[in-house]
Amino acid sequence: MRKVLTITLILLGCISSQMNEDTQQVIVVVNEKWEDSKATLYLLEKKDNQWQHQTSWPTVTGRNGLAWGKGEFTLPSKDMVEKKEGDGKAPAGIFKITNMLYGYAKTPPEGTKLNYTALSENYLGIDDSKSKYYNKIVDTRKIEKDWDSFEHMRRKDHLYRWVLVVEHNLNPTTKGSGSCIFLHLWISPQSDTSGCTAMSEANILKLIKWIDPQKKPRFIQLPRRIYQSYASQMGLPKLPVEEPKNEK
């Protein structure tokens, strides 16, 4: 574990200057332990060159907790547990958020600064690692099918009523390292996900309206202990000490 933390310190230190210069908004999700599916989301924003804690709310993540994802740094050691397709783990690390919002409504929520695509029955999320569209949301009317495994973006349970895409395993895409990582609605506070991060509709709407692409937002997902230990190396403040919260 000490080796893992030392490597983490080096990695986070390498990107701290970029975050300090470019990033003015950070979404932080922390699980208490690697294997936990329950988590807390914090919004941090830089104002007058100082990071400020905006708000926080409960979220749920992968049913099997977290594993290192492929975001803005590359893992240097095979000793560390990495995210794999179908492992039921959400990706840990530091990621960009795409500028695209997906949803079921014809128009985006008032106040959003994100580009918007209204999802129809033709939209799929491709998780077949053999497909050239692996890890992409596609409109099947515009392309030729080359996949066997996928998920419908227009779901009966409405979990994808609003979807933000986490830039995990995108540049370049590594086959089998996990796909279609979203921020979306949860079923309930007691639920979990296959690898995404989910929350109540009221809270995801707050998030959608808060995100400003011009402020170069980042998504950080880590066990709380690792985040708190290395917050200063990332140029970010430590998180408030809170009792776990439940939301009905």
Image: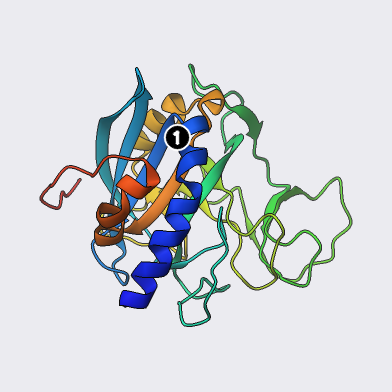
Residue 106: image location, x then y, percent: 61, 26
Amino acid beneath label 1 = Asn
Q: Looking at this view, name the residue that lies furthest to the left.
A: 243
Image location of residue 199, percent across then percent down: 35, 46
Q: In this view, does 96 lie above or below 21?
A: below
Q: Which residue lies furthest to the right in this view?
A: 144
Question: Residue 141 or 169: which is nearer the viewer?
Answer: 169
Viewer-proximal residue among 155 and 33: 33
Q: Quadrant of the N terminus?
A: bottom left
Residue depicted at x 65% and y 73%: 176
Is residue 48 visible in the rendered structure shown here? yes
The residue shown at (66%, 65%) is: 127
Which residue is located at x 72 percent, y 71 percent? 129
Tell me where residue 214 sits by quadrant: top right
According to the picture, the residue beneath numbered tag 1 turns out to be 20
- Would residue 63 be visible to someone looking at this image? no
Compared across the picture, whether 63 is left or right of 244 comes to right
Colour mode of the rendering: rainbow
As helix, strand or loop, the secondary structure at mark 1 comes to helix
Image location of residue 218, percent across then percent down: 48, 41
Q: In this view, does 84 lie above or below 99?
A: below
Q: Which residue is drawn at 10% across and 50% down?
A: 243
Number of marks in the image? 1
Q: How would you rate the neighbour count of disc 1 (Cα within 10 Å): few for under 14, some for 14-19, many for 20 or more?
A: some
Nearer to us in this view, 209 or 233 = 233
